[in-house]
Image (spheres, rainbow, N blue to C red):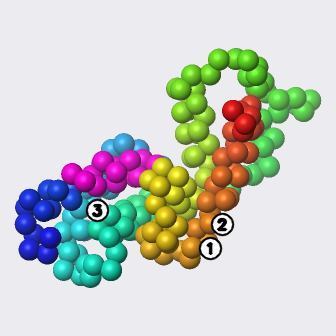
């Protein structure tokens, strides 16, 4: 790897390219931005290869680069984001306090596209940190220790972020009429 053997580097790109792309999507980036991020990850990987000490696995190192590149991109394009406000909550009701949109009937058929749309919308409501930790732990199935190395947060904080992400997702899906026991 350090000798920048094209075959070894190609194997790394093939082994991690799609996973990094999927992780970038899971962190809330659009498809084109996710592609750009993965390219940036591999450019940074090549530029910093001499500093890799082998204390972590290559995959953990690549996810760490992705995490930092994602944060850099968000800082560069960040607009003021406001947490849930009372106005957002109140906008779900009419003047008499009735829900504007009724929950689907319990026996209504639900297909994969509806499920994906509901989950996707709820994932957008998570903070950057919650979304990243949720994706790395639940989708990529990385250990808390690996996610800790990637994000720089303590293992305890990773647990807190994952718990908060799960609770927010459960509340969001519940507000959309999705029972968490489905």
Spatial distance from mark 3 to mark 2, Cα to Cα? 27 Å
Q: In this view, does 103 lie to the left or right of 63?
A: right
Left or right: residue 145 versus residue 53 is right
Question: For numbered disc 3, what is the local secondary structure?
Answer: helix
Q: Give the range drawn in magenta.
A: 14-26
Q: Which of 168 and 12 is in front in this view?
A: 12
Q: Residue 156 carries which label?
A: 1
Residue wearing tag 2: 160
Query: Magenta stretch: residue 16 in it?
Result: yes
Eyeballing the image, is 23 above or below 142? above
The x and y percentages for residue 37 are: 32, 56
Q: In the rendering, at what x and y percent does residue 35 appear?
A: 30, 48
Provide the secondary structure element on which disc 1 rests. Answer: helix
How far across and how far down the image is residue 26, in percent? 46, 49
- Residue at the (46%, 60%) spot, across then down: 142
Give the residue pinned by disc 3: 41
């Amino acid at each position: 790897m350090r000798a920048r053997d094209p075959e070894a580097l190609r194997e790394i790109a093939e082994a991690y390219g799609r996973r990094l792309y999927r992780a970038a999507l899971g962190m809330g980036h659009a498809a084109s931005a996710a592609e750009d991020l993965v390219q940036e990850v591999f450019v940074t990987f090549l530029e910093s290869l001499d500093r890799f000490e082998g204390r972590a696995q290559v995959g953990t190192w690549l996810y760490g680069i992705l995490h930092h590149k994602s944060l850099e991109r968000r800082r560069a394009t960040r607009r003021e984001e406001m947490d849930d406000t009372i106005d957002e909550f109140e906008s779900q009701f009419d003047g008499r306090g009735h829900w504007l949109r009724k929950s689907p009937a319990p026996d209504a058929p639900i297909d994969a596209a509806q499920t994906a749309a509901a989950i996707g919308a709820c994932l957008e409501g998570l903070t950057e940190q919650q979304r990243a930790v949720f994706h790395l732990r639940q989708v990529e199935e990385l250990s808390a220790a690996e996610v800790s190395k990637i994000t720089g947060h303590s293992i305890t904080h990773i647990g807190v972020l994952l718990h908060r992400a799960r609770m927010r997702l459960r509340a969001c899906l519940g507000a959309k009429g999705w029972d968490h026991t489905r």
